[in-house]
Amino acid sequence: MNLDLRETVEFVRNLVEEQAQLALDRWPSVNSILYKNQRDFVTEVDLEIENNLITRLRSRFPLHGFKGEETPPENPNVEHQWLIDPIDGTKYYAAHSSLFAISVALFHQGEPLLGVVHAPASGQCFHAYRGGGAFLDKQRLSGPKVSDLSSAIVNIDTPQSDELSDEEKQWFERKLIELTRRVYRVRMLGLGSLAACWIASGALDAYLDLTGYGKPQDIAAGRIIMQEAGVRLATIDPPAGPPRLAAAAPHILQKLMNILKR
C-alpha cells in the first residue's frame, strides 16, 4: 500500500486530538482499575483511548498491524505496524499531574515512518513524518544546539532495579554517577515520549535509555520526531543486558557514547 505520509500524519493528528480531549474530560474522575505489577497500573481511560485509536486506524488501514500498550497485538507479522501508547505517564495522569501524553507511531519493516505525540494538559502536538521535518503544532523543530557536554541537560530513563542482574546494576550505577559529574543537569522524567519531543524542541539536549527493558511504544513516535529534528541516535551495547538507546545533539552524542562505552 502506498501511503501519503503528509495526509496520514494529519489524519493521526486529528484522531489523537479527539482522544486528548477525552483524556481531559475524564481526568477529574479517573480511577485505576488494574495493577500490572507493584507499581504499574492501567486505567479505564487508557483502555478506552487505545481501543478508540485502534478501531479508527483499523477502519482506514485494515491490512496494517497494531501493537497497543494495553491490548494484544493484531497482525504482528505484516510490514506496517502501528505502535500506540494511549497514555504515557498513567501514574501522573491518575494522580492529576499534567505530565502525560498520547503517542502514536507507524513503522514499516521496523523503521519509523511517522509519529504523533500529544500532551493533552498543554494542548501541544508534536509530529513528524519521514522526510517531512518535525513540528510542534505549526512550528518547525531543529533540535538542541549545545556543543559542550558540560552545558548539556540530559534526560535518563532509569531501570527498574528488580529487573537487572548484578552486572547491569553496577554498570548503570557507574555510568549514572559519571554522567552527573560530566553534564550540566540530569533529568529523570519517566516519560519517554515527551522527553524525546523536548529534545527535538531543544528543551533537553540528550535522551539516554539506561533501562533496556522499556516498551517499544514508549519511544516509538519520539524516534521519528527526534530524527526529523536533526537529533542523532545511536545504540549502546552494555557489558550485560539488552542494547540501550542514546539520542543527542550531534556535537555531544559521541562524547556521551565515549562515557557509556568505556
Image: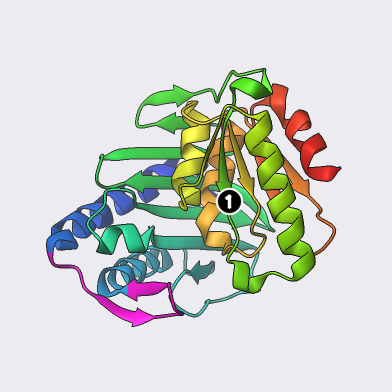
In-front residue for pair 81/68: 68
In the image, what residue occupies the spot 60% across and 55% down? 107
Is residue 35 on the magenta stretch? yes
In-front residue for pair 152/178: 178
- Choose top left, top right, bottom left or bottom right for residue 102: bottom left
Colour theme: rainbow
- Choose top left, top right, bottom left or bottom right for residue 216: bottom right
Q: Residues within 10 Å of mark 1 (few under 14, many from 20)?
A: few
In the image, what residue occupies the spot 58% across and 26% down? 184
Amino acid of disc 1 = Asn
Give the residue at mark 1: 2
Place of residue 230 in the rendered image (x, y in percent of width and height, measured from the top left): 62, 27
Q: Quadrant of the C terminus?
A: top right
Side of 29 relative to 8 (left or right): left
Is residue 192 on the magenta stretch? no
In-front residue for pair 179/227: 179
In-front residue for pair 142/262: 262
Residue 235 visible in the picture: yes
Place of residue 33 in the rendered image (x, y in percent of width and height, measured from the top left): 28, 80
Q: Please tell me whether mark 1 sits on a helix, a strand or a loop.
A: loop
Extent of the magenta region = 29-42
Place of residue 255 in the rendered image (x, y in percent of width and height, measured from the top left): 77, 29
In the image, what residue occupies the spot 56% across and 64% down? 215
Number of marks in picture: 1
Place of residue 24 in the rendered image (x, y in percent of width and height, measured from the top left): 19, 55
In the image, what residue occupies the spot 69% across and 58% down? 109
Side of 194 relative to 162 (left or right): left
Residue 6 visible in the picture: no
Answer above or below: position of 21 versus 226. Answer: below
